[in-house]
Image (cartoon, rainbow, N blue to C red):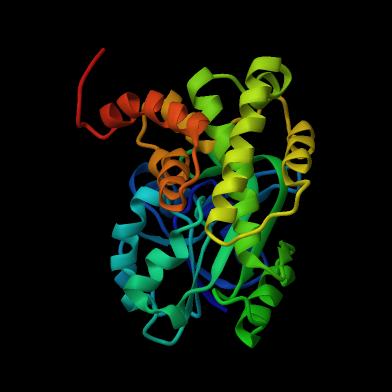
Amino acid sequence: MRVVMFGAGGVGGYFGARLVEAGHDVVFIARGAHLAALRRDGLRVESPAGDARLARVSATDDPRAAGPADLVIVAVKSWQLPEASRGLSTLLEGGGVVLPLLNGVEAAAQLAEVVGDDRVLKGLARIISFIASPGTIRHVGAEPTMALGEPDGRPSERVQRVAGVLRGAGIRTEVPDDIDAALWLKFLFVVPIGGLGAVTRAPMGVVRSQPETRALLEAAMHEVQAVAAGHGVALPADTVPKALRFIETLPAEGTASLHRDVAEGRRSELDAWNGAVVRLGREAGVPTPVHAFIYHSLLPLERRARGEIAFA
């Protein structure tokens, strides 16, 4: 299968490497020093699931040079999605399909506005990974997993075909009965831990072990569950206890990408994470005081990273 990995960071780089290892024709869309390293030295993956060293990979910063593709996996940051969307038409000229792996619950709808409902699947990834250095992806936690489904939840041959390709590459792949519930379950896990980590600058082990931050973490998860229900997605009653137990299994030193971006002064996905909980909660008439506090506390840093304000 010809696959375009739109984004070659911790998610796109890892899963793209596994597809290359399985013999698929993969093109990475990247930029900057990471792109230069991919072109010069190939791609390296460091992972408890097995390292990979790909001496040569196909990489570009121009979507027009990458397509057409059978499958476009979009793995960019949420704030990069509008720019990425503009490059999709060329990639889909052969009738391909788009699978977004962005954090959040709105990416598929945003992509469908550009390329049409019939060209977009819903999807998510579970993995803790990042660019350790240009050309090198480091996977440090969580079994690398992808989940996907049709936006309307119906079974389809194309979902099974894509799932088969992923499984054939050794990637744990799920086709849940309710992809929306799966998206909100991940949202419930990653957004509270990411936001609280960014506010406190503390890793997961600290956030989950201190009574005060653990209470905030639990309250923030309940807020997401209530917002999901307000938008017609009913999560199981034991969702929050299960999420807290799962967090206990993760490396104590682990951090979410939002935490790392804010701590390093980079633009983050704050608007699509905690900001989205606040906005979607307002739309559904659901109060979200914990997420509002996190969002408003981080906004000055976010606006500085975007160049909108300046302070020392």
Name the image quarter holding residue 309.
top left
- Residue 167: horizontal and vertical position, in percent? 73, 69
Tell me, yes or no, if residue 45 can be seen here.
Answer: no
At 52% across and 29% down in the image, what residue appears?
290
- Residue 198: horizontal and vertical position, in percent? 49, 26
Q: Relative to 195, is 158 above or below? A: below
Q: Report the label total.
A: 0
Q: Nearer the viewer, residue 291 or 93?
A: 291
Q: Nearer the viewer, residue 250 or 212?
A: 212
At 44% across and 87% down in the image, what residue appears?
95
Residue 195 placement, left or right of 30:
right
Residue 119 placement, left or right of 115:
right
Q: Nearer the viewer, residue 178 or 259?
A: 178
Q: Which quadrant: the C terminus?
A: top left
Residue at the front extreme of this rendering: 285
Q: Which quadrant: the N terminus?
A: bottom right
Q: Relative to 128, is 18 above or below? A: below
Q: Relative to 81, is 98 above or below? A: below
Name the image quarter holding residue 209.
top right
At 33% across and 45% down in the image, what residue appears?
32
- Residue 307: horizontal and vertical position, in percent? 21, 31
Name the image quarter holding residue 109.
bottom left
At 57% across and 64% down in the image, what residue appears?
123
- Residue 158: horizontal and vertical position, in percent? 60, 83
Tell me, yes or no, if residue 195 can be seen here.
Answer: yes
